[in-house]
Image: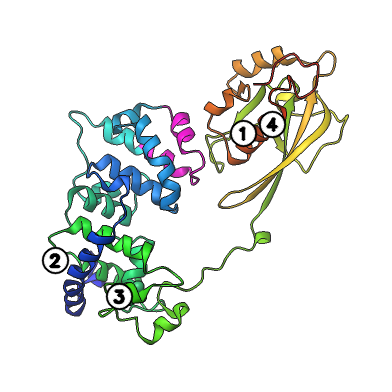
Amino acid sequence: MSPSEKLRADELFLASEARPLLLLWYDKNRRDLPWRRSRDPYRVWVSEIMLQQTTVKTVLGYYDRFLGRFPTVIDLARADLSLVLKLWEGLGYYQRARNLHWAAGIVAGNPGPLRWPQSVEEWQSLPGIGRSTAGAIFSLSTDRWAPILDANVRRVTGRLFGLPDVLPGREARLWAASNSWGPGNPRPGDTNQALMELGAILCKPSAPSCDQCPLASLCRTRSAESKAPEALPGSLPKPRAGKNSVPLRKRVALVPASGLLHFEPRGEGRLLEGLLEVAGFPSPGLSPGERVGEGAYGGWQVVEELFAVRHVYSHFREEVRVFLVSPPPGAPGAKDLERVCDGDGAGVRASLSEADRLALTGVSRKIVERLKKEFSGKGTILSGGSHPMS
Ligand code: SF4
């Protein structure tokens, strides 16, 4: 704690008054979420990482499946990164999964019996764990006190303690205010859970339900300002990136008539690193009859455009036009290509059903699903192909 995060007597008093009201409300209104049923540090850790920038509703579809496949930190550490990414597919922000896997290797790799980090600082030393996440994992798994400041707690704290958005040294003041829940707290972990829950259910960004809030009588922001929610701390509308201000990347993806698709890994340092994508390259489009000049299908001929798909990632949009290609006489056929691709580590070949087991980028998953929908059961994308679509 830095000197600027010094606890203030008035905030300690406010927190001590508010705490019983908050916990009473939490006991009656808490949602039954799977990660609240255990204090196991591994389960808490996985939930906190999944919940970063992702809604509870979305995480619910992933959490049990992930833990079913990797029930312990040792299972996760031993797993292939590609499998971890596969189970993360659709959750987005894949760096979280890579860091989780990396950090699991560090924890499980310590010599001797498994030893979990013993302090907020030790948790924070692991890849992908910042101060607030470290505080949450420590506090929820040990039921000991540590302040947290995720988006929900930041908003509740800013409002309850009356810290306007524009305030010199606000960050340190927020940490100090959050920390004022700690002294003499009989239920530290539940207090942090309750603050997060209050932010998620009642103290929402643009329309807080102050009338139902257990802290309304103590809240320094309620009153006149609650009639104009946009004036509440934490309510300033984030500048929404307009659709056109998010970069649009255009690619082509190539599909042979056999339906045996070639998938290439996205390289080191690129966004979505480690995921596979349907072979292709950056280009606005191709024309029927054109020869493909590069990549796995170099020398093949474009037959026709099949369809186009679009996908929005966190930092860019991608538009991919999908083209059917065929080998011209003398060029490597499907079997030769299969050997080339399998042998040099430049990618994998898989049928549409086999692709279910691969960790694909969002846009490539859409391509596979569209191909399945339109061509499964029809034998081949072009009649007369040599491999059945499956
Ligand atoms: S009274 Fe309103 S603004 Fe204050 S903490 Fe409760 S919901 Fe948030």
What secondary structure characterizes most of the magenta part? helix
Query: Where is mark 2, residue-wise?
Result: 183
For the residue labelled by badge 2, is the local secondary structure a helix, a strand or a loop?
A: loop
Whole-number angstrom distance, CA of label 3 to CA of label 4: 53 Å
Q: Position of residue 178 (x, y in %)?
A: 26, 67
For the residue labelled by badge 3, is the local secondary structure a helix, a strand or a loop?
A: helix
- Ligand 1 within 8 Å of the CB at mark 3: yes
Asked if the residues shown at circle 3 and circle 1 are in contact, with their CB atoms under 8 angstroms apart, the answer is no
Q: Residue 200, located in which quarter of the rendered image?
A: bottom left
**First reached walking from the N terminus: tag 3 or tag 2:** 3
Whole-number angstrom distance, CA of label 4 to CA of label 1: 14 Å
Res 160 label: 3
At label 1, counting other C-alpha atoms closer than 10 Å, the crowd grade (few under 14, some 14-19, many 20 or more) is many
Q: Residue at x 44, y 78 (%)?
A: 229
**First reached walking from the N terminus: tag 3 or tag 1:** 3
Asked if the residues shown at circle 4 and circle 2 are in contact, with their CB atoms under 8 angstroms apart, the answer is no
For the residue labelled by badge 4, is the local secondary structure a helix, a strand or a loop?
A: helix
Q: Nearer the viewer, mark 3 or mark 4?
A: 4
**First reached walking from the N terminus: tag 4 or tag 1:** 1
Give 287 or 374, whichever is nearer the viewer.
Answer: 374
**In this rendering, does residue 227 appear at all?**
yes
Q: Position of residue 150 (x, y in %)?
A: 35, 60
Whole-number angstrom distance, CA of label 4 to CA of label 2: 59 Å
Q: Quadrant of the N terminus?
A: bottom left
Residue extent of the magenta highlight:
80-102
Amino acid carrying mark 1 in the image: Glu
At label 4, counting other C-alpha atoms closer than 10 Å, the crowd grade (few under 14, some 14-19, many 20 or more) is some
